[in-house]
Amino acid sequence: MVVDREGPILVEGPVEVVGDDGTTTRSDRFVVAICTCRRSRAYPWCDTSHRRRKPAEGHPDGREPEEREKEPRP
């Protein structure tokens, strides 16, 4: 197993993950990336959603336009 503070946990497979709700997910791959940030759309498997995006040009907060639109408007 390899743990990286900025990314997923890499585990030699096959791997069986039991979620906090009791569901079991299995992968027969030779190495599996397990998501630790919960941003993955394929959770518990990592889909690299943890990677930071480059700041959007012209936006001082550096967030992508779709991220800003999710904020509630006053």
Image (cartoon, rainbow, N blue to C red):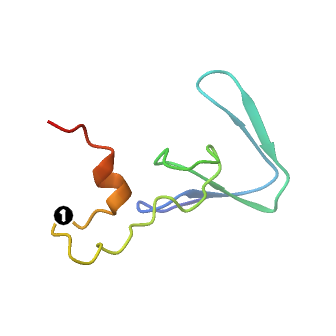
Quarter of the rendering occupied by the N terminus: bottom right
Residue that carries the numbered disc 1 in the rendered image: 61
Left or right of 7 in this view: 29 = right
The residue at 30%/73% (across/down) is 56
Binning the other alpha carbons within 10 Å of mark 1 as few (below 14), some (14 to 19) or many (20 upward) gives few
Please determine whether, in this image, residue 58 is positioned above or below residue 68.
below
> Residue lying farthest right?
28
Left or right of 11 in this view: 54 = left
Residue 2 rendering spot, x and y as whole percentages: 58, 62
The residue at 75%/37% (across/down) is 25
The residue at 33%/61% (across/down) is 65
The residue at 63%/30% (across/down) is 19
Q: Which amino acid does label 1 sit on?
A: Asp
Left or right of 62 in this view: 46 = right
Quarter of the rendering occupied by the C terminus: top left
Residue 61 rendering spot, x and y as whole percentages: 18, 64
Q: Say what secondary structure mark 1 lies in.
A: loop
Please determine whether, in this image, residue 2 is positioned above or below residue 58.
above
